[in-house]
Amino acid sequence: MPHPALEKIHHDITAWYSANARELPWRGSAAGPWAVMVSEFMLQQTPVVRVRPVWEAWMQRWPTPAALAAEPVAEAVRAWGRLGYPRRALRLHAAAVVITNEHGGKVPGTEAELLALPGVGTYTAAAIACFAFKVPTVVVDTNIRRVHARLVSGKALPEQSQNAAELALAARLLPQAGEGNDAGTALANDWNIAVMELGALVCTARSPRCEDCPVVNQCAWIAAGRPEPHYKPKGQPWHGTDRQVRGAMMAVLRHSTAPVQRRDLLGTVDLAAAAAEARPLNPAREADDEHRAWVGLHALDAPAEQRERALASLLADGLAQQSPAGIALPR
DNA sequence: CAACCGTGGTT
DNA sequence: TAACCAAGGTT
């Protein structure tokens, strides 16, 4: 038997969503499963505003999994641009190949099949099943976890890693769906996207806009007086890390039409000479993106050992490929 | 399972 | 400005 207070929360949040949802191109009836899948890959740890233009270009160029699968991986990595975590481009391409070869070119609609695809984990499988195939499954992402933590558990932030209790809570909160209950199924699907959107727009991590929240009067965190987080979030170091060096090398490889010599990529050429040769940047010119990438790589003061390590990891990850001609994006 | 993996906007 | 954060996945 449904709980009245829970039903009110279901109503308040889904009603808020109908009035306040962003219009995104991968939402709505025009977006098929492939459109949803591409968006989910790009949205892994990347904000909507940066995904949107890349998604548009991607879908225009590769409207189907087969279209993407027919091209070299390098094209996917280039089109990925500066979205970050370029391994996602590798995995999206690999997933497109699997879909083309083993699923008749159609994105599969069950979570089990989706989970078997490269780059698809628990969240992405559930999201595609729910958003693209209207499967009333439990979707849990960082936004949903945070809303649940505040609204129900009275905490400022969810636990540092997702646990069984959080999953059980999400399952308990999901509106009841199932055979012969089309209204319940529709509500469950709405609920997932609505809670996610609430977390993204209102119940944000750092400065929640509680004055705009549809369930502020039912929020356990508000009732508790908005207590501070019970732990200190772990930082994500960047300067001086291997990731920074990898990123700089990837930028060079993305913009390079020809293979790059190993010593050049390692930046072991004289840095002062390289800087002296650097001409002023002209952002309007395509060629200057390549120039900018080179300058960025050479500007790093990373030790030679670290550069070697970063390049080795790029090769190991399949983001770069070694040939007699030099180093380039994988084909 | 904790650590690793990019990038750029926000606070 | 340094730190934080973002529709996670993989090892």
Image: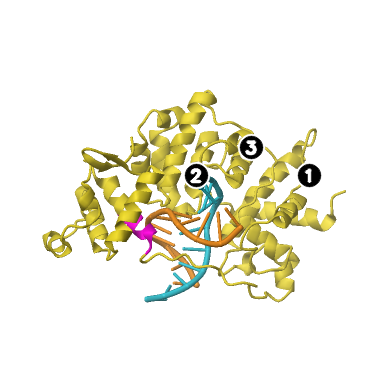
Chain colours: A yellow, B orange, C cyan
Residue under pointer 2: A41
| Residue A268 x, y percent position in the rendering | 20, 57
Bin the neighbour count of mark 2 within 10 Å (Cα to Cα): few under 14, some 14-19, many 20 and up.
some
Residue A25 shows up from this direction = no
Q: Secondary structure at mark 2?
A: helix
Q: Find out whether residue A242 is within the magenta segment.
A: yes
Query: As shown in the figure, which amino acid type bears the numbered disc 1?
Result: Gln
Q: Name the image quarter holding the C terminus of chain A.
A: top left
| Dots 2 and 3 on the same chain | yes
Residue A111 falls left or right of residue A177: left
Residue under pointer 3: A111
Residue A153 shows up from this direction = yes
- Residue at point 69% right, 55% down? A13
- Measured along the vertical axis of the image, is residue A44 above or below residue A118? below
Q: Earlier in the sequence, mark 1 or mark 2?
A: 2
Bin the neighbour count of mark 3 within 10 Å (Cα to Cα): few under 14, some 14-19, many 20 and up.
many
Q: Earlier in the sequence, mark 2 or mark 3?
A: 2
Query: As shown in the figure, which amino acid type bears the numbered disc 2?
Result: Phe
The Cα–Cα distance between marks 1 and 3, rounded to whole angstroms, is 19 Å
**Magenta highlight range:** A241-248
Residue under pointer 1: A176
Query: As shown in the figure, which amino acid type bears the numbered disc 3?
Result: Glu
Q: Chain of mark 3?
A: A
Q: Secondary structure at mark 1?
A: loop
- Measured along the vertical axis of the image, is residue A275 above or below residue A293? below
Q: Find out whether residue A264 is within the magenta segment.
A: no
Question: Which residue is the extreme one toward the front?
Answer: A305
| Residue A111 x, y percent position in the rendering | 64, 37
